[in-house]
């Protein structure tokens, strides 16, 4: 038996609860299956949506949510993994269409796993989680498009959230000048501790703006979308780049072609879920190299499996700062 959060949807409604499940209930993986004894999971924005049912993230019921997990291999039919190996999982539809990480045990396809990077403890790997690995993918996107620290300021939106907090930490360590955008003025000191040089009110970005505004940002990491992303596009410098990964403010994008055709700006989309394995391995390797672990500690707090259910609502309400690690064995 193992403990897990189970999401059920039936005539009685949509609900999440901690339950004791039998190993025989774990999903079948006909080829290359790996059973993982999970030590930690996390709460990402998407887990918040799944646990509350606010958006149709979960595609099959009953579902164990949790798009991230870390643990040790208990049984393996995959050539790359043997019993006792420490592994990490991010995405691949786990927690949406396949039972996920908010559980003491998971059965997964071995191709989805990456070895736990030596730079991190299991809990630290989940402090990074999908949010942190996505922040790294965003930084890599800026680099790939040639944005250098000497080019000017980098804007980070949703700054006090998971993606935002890790993005600021990474960019500051890499020598970029980072400007943070937040709706929580009380988090200004926290954001400066992570490395932001200036903190702006998100109200200045969240309303409709002009197709073109004064050029300011050499690059941006946006986890908000909607008018915020449109306003970023309008105020990027000539040939600036925005790495767009989120929709915390809305999934629409009310922009014009003007920034693209007159200033040659780049809108670089970032997806972590189906991101190919070489890019994942690169992102984790760079996280091991470029993420300040002391700051990762400041970003993170730990909760129990049962606490994940109420914390999910708090996360969607914008009340959670940084990253949440779930110790699934407490
Ligand atoms: P968090 O909830 O930790 O952070 C989101 C932050 O966005 C909040 O902390 C808040 O920051 C800001 N925010 C919330 N609501 C609004 C709003 N209505 N308008 C403007 N800003 C708002 O989530 P994550 O960091 O885990 O994820 C951020 C986004 O990135 C989500 O949309 C998520 O779905 C997406 N994402 C996408 C991935 C991908 O593969 N493309 C992977 C991971 C995440 P503040 O209080 O500082 O303003």
Image (cartoon, rainbow, N blue to C red):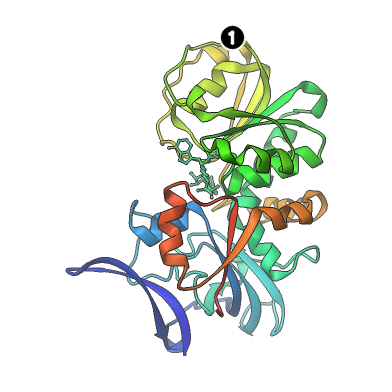
Q: Residue at x 65, y 40 (%)?
A: 138
Would you place residue 212 above or below residue 195 in this image?
above
Would you place residue 3 above or below residue 159 in this image?
below
Q: Residue at x 52, y 77 (%)?
A: 107
Q: Nearer the viewer, residue 275 or 328?
A: 328
- Quadrant of residue 63 within the rendered picture: bottom left
Q: Position of residue 132 (x, y in %)?
A: 64, 51
Q: Residue at x 62, y 48 (%)?
A: 134
Q: Residue at x 43, y 50 (%)?
A: 316
Q: Is residue 74 left or right of residue 152?
A: left
Question: Quadrant where the C terminus lies?
Answer: bottom right
Q: Nearer the viewer, residue 113 or 313?
A: 313
Q: Is residue 156 left or right of residue 17?
A: right
Q: Residue furthest front?
A: 186
Would you place residue 283 above or below residue 222 in this image?
below
Q: Is residue 9 left or right of residue 72?
A: left
Q: Is residue 203 visible?
A: yes
Q: Which residue is mark 1?
A: 262
**Mark 1 residue's CB less than 8 Å from ligand 1:** no
Q: Nearer the viewer, residue 205 or 132?
A: 205
Q: Nearer the viewer, residue 280 or 179?
A: 179
Q: Is residue 140 visible?
A: no
């Amino acid at each position: 038996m193992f403990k897990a959060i189970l999401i059920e949807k039936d005539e009685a409604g949509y609900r999440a609860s901690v339950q004791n499940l039998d190993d025989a209930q774990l999903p079948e993986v006909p080829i290359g299956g790996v059973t993982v004894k999970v030590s930690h999971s996390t709460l990402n924005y998407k887990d918040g949506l799944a646990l509350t049912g606010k958006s149709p993230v979960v595609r099959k019921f009953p579902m164990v949510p949790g798009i991230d997990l870390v643990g040790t291999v208990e049984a393996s039919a995959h050539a790359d993994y043997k019993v006792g190996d420490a592994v990490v999982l991010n995405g691949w539809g786990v927690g949406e269409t396949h039972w996920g990480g908010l559980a003491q045990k998971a059965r997964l396809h071995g191709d989805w796993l990456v070895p736990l990077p030596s730079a991190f403890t299991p809990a630290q790997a989940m402090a990074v989680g999908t949010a942190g690995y996505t922040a790294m993918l965003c930084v890599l996107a800026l680099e790939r498009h040639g944005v250098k620290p000497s080019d000017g300021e980098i804007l980070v939106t949703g700054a006090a959230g998971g993606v935002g907090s890790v993005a600021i930490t990474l960019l500051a360590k890499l020598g970029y000048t980072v400007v943070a955008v937040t709706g929580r003025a009380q988090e200004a000191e926290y954001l400066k501790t992570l490395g932001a040089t200036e903190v702006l009110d998100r109200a200045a970005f969240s309303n409709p703006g002009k197709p073109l505004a004064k050029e300011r940002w050499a690059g941006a990491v946006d986890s908000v979308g909607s008018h915020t992303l449109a306003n970023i596009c309008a105020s990027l410098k000539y040939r600036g780049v925005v790495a767009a990964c989120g929709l915390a403010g809305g999934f629409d994008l009310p922009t014009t072609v003007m920034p693209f055709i007159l200033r040659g700006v780049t809108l670089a989309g970032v997806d972590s879920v189906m991101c190919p394995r070489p890019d994942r391995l690169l992102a984790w390797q760079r996280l091991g190299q470029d993420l300040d672990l002391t700051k990762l500690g400041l970003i993170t707090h730990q909760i129990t499996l049962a606490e994940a259910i109420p914390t999910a609502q708090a996360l969607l309400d914008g009340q959670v700062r940084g990253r949440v690690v779930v110790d699934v064995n407490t």
